[in-house]
Amino acid sequence: MLITFKSPAAPDVMMLENLAEYLLGIIGKQLTERGVITHEDLPSAIEKLEAAVSSDKKERAEHDGHFHEGEEGHEPHEIPIGLAQRAYPFLDMMRLAQKDGKDILWGV
């Protein structure tokens, strides 16, 4: 199922339910039928999501040298998309909403 986040400060952001649940969990919210991230909650939410993205980037960088691409006996594989790419539209929306003092809603 798709979840659509809305704010007067930014274009709508749509994502799959499992990603929405994961990102909301990072910022301390639960995915319910309807919800809100108030503009008062945004500074903390942005900080938490930025920290998670930074941690993910660090972990991915540590593993970059551990892929055996091109070595005999190892199949080539794609590197999965990281949290930064998945979270960027939502993080951008939160920053714009914070800047304009607006809330973010879903399920409306």
Image (cartoon, rainbow, N blue to C red):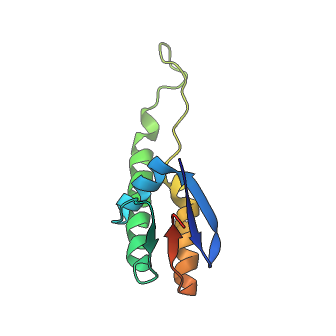
In the figure, 21 relative to 95: above or below?
A: above
Q: Is residue 8 left or right of residue 105?
A: right
Q: Nearer the viewer, residue 71 or 85?
A: 85
Q: Residue furthest bottom?
A: 101
- Give the image location of residue 22, x and y in percent: 40, 53
Q: Is residue 85 left or right of residue 51?
A: right
Q: Residue at x 58, y 85 (%)?
A: 100
Residue 86 % position (x, y) = 53, 52
Q: Position of residue 60 (x, y in %)?
A: 43, 46
Tell me what residue is drawn at x 52 percent, y 36 percent.
79
Camera-side residue of 45 and 13 = 13
Q: Where is residue 29? Give x, y as percent.
A: 36, 65
Quadrant of the frame with the C terminus: bottom right
Position above or below: 2 against 79? below
Residue positioned most to the top: 73
> Taking 60 as reference, is 99 above or below it?
below
Question: Which residue sits at x=44%, y=68%?
Answer: 35
| Residue found at the far right of this picture | 11
- Image quadrant of residue 6? bottom right
Position above or below: 44 against 73: below
| Image-based side of 70 in relation to 45, left or right | right
Q: Identify which residue is drawn at 38% across, 56% down.
A: 55
